Image: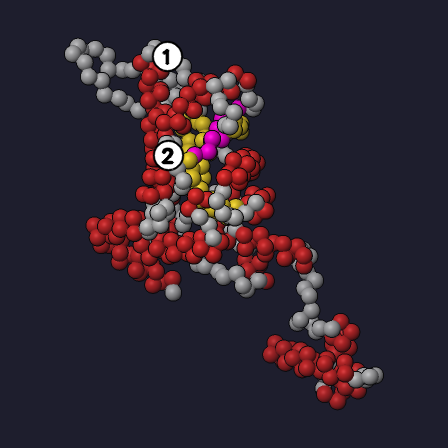
Amino acid sequence: MAEQYREINARIDKALPVLRRMEKPNISAYATLHGLPYQRLLQAYNNGHNRSTRPKTNQRLKPHQQVALKEFLDQVDNVGFGIHVELLQAHPEYQKTKQKPVDILRKLAQSPKRIEGWFTEFKRVLISLGVLDDDLWNIDKTGVRISVARNQYVYTRYEGSDVMASGENRELVTLVECIGARGVALEPMVIIKAKSIIERWCMELPDGYLLATSDSAYNNDELALSWLKHFNKNTRDNRKGRWRVLLMDSHTSHLTHEFVTYTHNNRILLYAFPPHTTHFMQPLDVGCFQPLKTHHRQELNLNACTGGKAFTKADFLAVVNDIQRRTFTPKNCKGAFKRTGIVPYKPEVVLKALREKEEEDPHKKRYWMRAEYQEH
């Protein structure tokens, strides 16, 4: 029955050009002569299309909205944005990829073949847009507990207490950091848990810092957009080429329509690392976050050793600039990009380490090969 329906529609499509060439077409006679349904032929003649080719009438989005949505999806393609199944069916140009459980994804993430493919595509994008090394940036966030330090060894000639005072403030502070391949770092966004900002908190902060509040001290869509405008303001006049690239994870705050539209309008390309790989592929994770937390612990220990009692939000904000200064040195920033094989472009830096792990555990190699084979 379905085949007959499609066959009739195909015959109607062929009939329409013939009828339109006639000066006064007799639709009824033509339908009878060629065995076509009169009403369907008449409707197709009047509308210019049959039931199969006519525009869909049960869609919530208008044609111009569909176009805008497709443009948005194309912009976030490199960021790993998920597409609704009905949209995939309506637009076959978007390809569907089989999902895997998270534990499998984590294991597959370190497959040298996959990482090499990411580097190859990344280089292709840079060449196609003419992006220079000095216009490569990496943004990510890290959380620190305001007054939580680790144990320290104490050497002494005398027996005594091995307990050092430590603060009890376990509140989280989120630092949104961004470093450039040229060896520079932007002033961070500091997100604290509070309803409003108290003036004395800002007394020790340089003018370029962004101090923000949220109910949980975590980043959100609104704060992410504020940070993006901060990034654009502080990098647009120093860019070397037309485009800047922002290397990042696929956090949902980076995928809002406002965030992506702003980047597109300001020639900022969002480029995501493969899922579950930032711990060995992202410059900030590899070269900066550990020193930052080390310097934070040193400040806590200094506070405890000098008789300090509570280490509060105000105390943290008073020393955060010194922590930043000691952490994000030109050497550390450049070294972070170098150790991840991004600048200079040497994927082998990362791939060599992955292959060495593969040799240490041959079961991993067999697992990757089996999983990649099953994909196809």
Position of residue 323 relative to residue 181, above or below, is above
Question: Where in the figure is residue 106, as x and y percent of width and height?
Answer: 36, 48
Question: Where in the figure is residue 196, as x and y percent of width and height?
Answer: 57, 23
Cβ–Cβ under 8 Å for marks 1 and 2: no
Which amino acid type is shown beneath numbered disc 1? Gly
Question: Where in the figure is residue 371, as x and y percent of width and height?
Answer: 33, 59
Q: Quadrant of the N terminus?
A: bottom right
Asked whether, in this view, residue 10 is left or right of residue 188, the answer is right
Is residue 16 in sight in this rendering? Answer: yes
Please identify the dominant SS of the magenta region.
strand
Nearest the viewer among 228 and 334 is 334
Residue 151 is labelled as none
- Residue identifier under label 1: 308
Is residue 281 in sight in this rendering? Answer: no
Position of residue 372 relative to residue 353, above or below, is below
Q: Give me the residue at 31% from left, 54% from top.
A: 112
Q: CA distance from mark 1 to mark 2?
A: 32 Å
Q: Secondary structure at mark 2?
A: helix
Instruction: Using the rendered view, name the quadrant where residue 310 is placed.
Output: top left
Which amino acid type is shown beneath numbered disc 2? Pro
Magenta highlight range = 185-194
Q: Give me the residue at 37% from left, 12% from top.
A: 308
Position of residue 178 relative to residue 215, above or below, is below
